[in-house]
Amino acid sequence: MFLQSNDTVIGVLRVTSTTRECSEPRTLGGPPGNAPRGEQTTKKGNAAPMSSSNQHLDTGQTFGVPQAYLPAEAAAEAGPLSRSTKDDAGKKRNTSYPPAPEPLPYGVPDNHTHLDFRDGSVHVTVAAALDAANAVGVPGVIQVGCDVESSEFAVRAASEDPRVLAAVSIHPNDAPRLAESDDLDAAIARIDELAAHERVRAIGETGLDYFRTQEPGRPAQEYSFREHIRIARKHSKALQIHDRDAHLDVVRVLKDEQLPERVVFHCFSGDADLARICNENGWYLSFSGTVTFKNSTDLREALLVAKPELVLVETDAPFLTPHPYRGRPNASYLIPQTVRFMAETLGVGLEEYCRTLADNTERVYGAF
């Protein structure tokens, strides 16, 4: 269980409490996933440069970019990516980690997470986060990069720990800014280089976001989206789609392009009609904690329509924490909360459903 105190135990690992609040908006324009209002992200300062001298993923050590859980003093210097400690109403949200759920009867990987985003009132190493997930039946994660730096981190994390596979990309909301500074093509070229790594199993999250990017920036988003599709096809990697308030245009681009074999709608945010389109095209639907939210009727209808062999599950941590812990820090150890809800919604046995999700995940990303 998680103990809420200055010293916190996650699984069997002890971690030390730290607090730090950032105030400036994150340059990506918000959370990496399809977060509802209240799921805010902030960034203060600049990330420290990538270095091959980073320590390995041993418990209690740091690894990769500074967003990935540095000691408090170092984090203050590095300026980690982190969620806001306040909700949209300006009220301080609960930043304590939810209790660990009962372990799953069969292991189900987390299809999409961001270990390099900091959240919560405790200091958690990457290894501790993975160990906590393992303890409840989450054997591995897909670590998703949203810019060059975090994509490089994802590759290194996947190289260092067999429980991690990588996805690399330029986030749709970052594309307009990079295009304006004439840096988009160079960033995409670096993603192309990283995609050749054996531990990179997906290109994404890429796609279109009309919630945070207005009309002037949308041509750059679509250009970047099409380039990511080309990279995924070139390297025979899965394609992870970010689709927020842009369903019709995302489908238009996908149907207009020659696609890789495996396409995943990360943090699926559509309705039953979009689920049927996914069924027709063999595209995967990855459900996050949003499917458990009380107002997510459309998502539950989509889950009921989706072909079981096309369904995946993810956290999009540290965002989109499943009910009843919405707004608190999310992490891969909470996958069982969403999986149980999905199985109950579908009226299927938990172990049977876990095996289906695990098989689907391996079919998309290969073995860890």
Image (tube, rainbow, N blue to C red):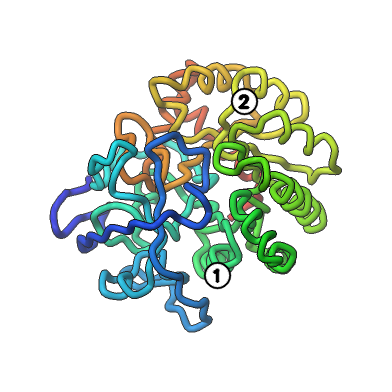
In the image, farthest residue toward the bottom: 53
- Image-quadrant location for residue 67: bottom left
At 50% from the left and 77% from the top, the residue drawn is 49
| Amino acid under disc 2 | Pro
For this orientation, the residue located farthest to the left is 5
Q: State the residue in front, 172 or 122.
A: 172
The reply to whether residue 197 is in sight is no
Residue depicted at 74% across the width and 64% down the height: 185
Q: In this view, does 327 lie to the left or right of 362?
A: left
Q: In which quarter of the image is the N terminus?
A: top left
Mark 2 sits on what residue? 308
Q: Which of marks 1 and 2 is nearer the N terminus?
A: 1
Q: Could you tell me the amino acid type at mark 1?
A: Arg
Dot 1: within a 10 Å radius of its alpha carbon, few (fewer than 14), some, or many (20 or more) residues?
many
Residue located at (67% from left, 60% from top): 180
Circle 1 is placed at which residue position? 156
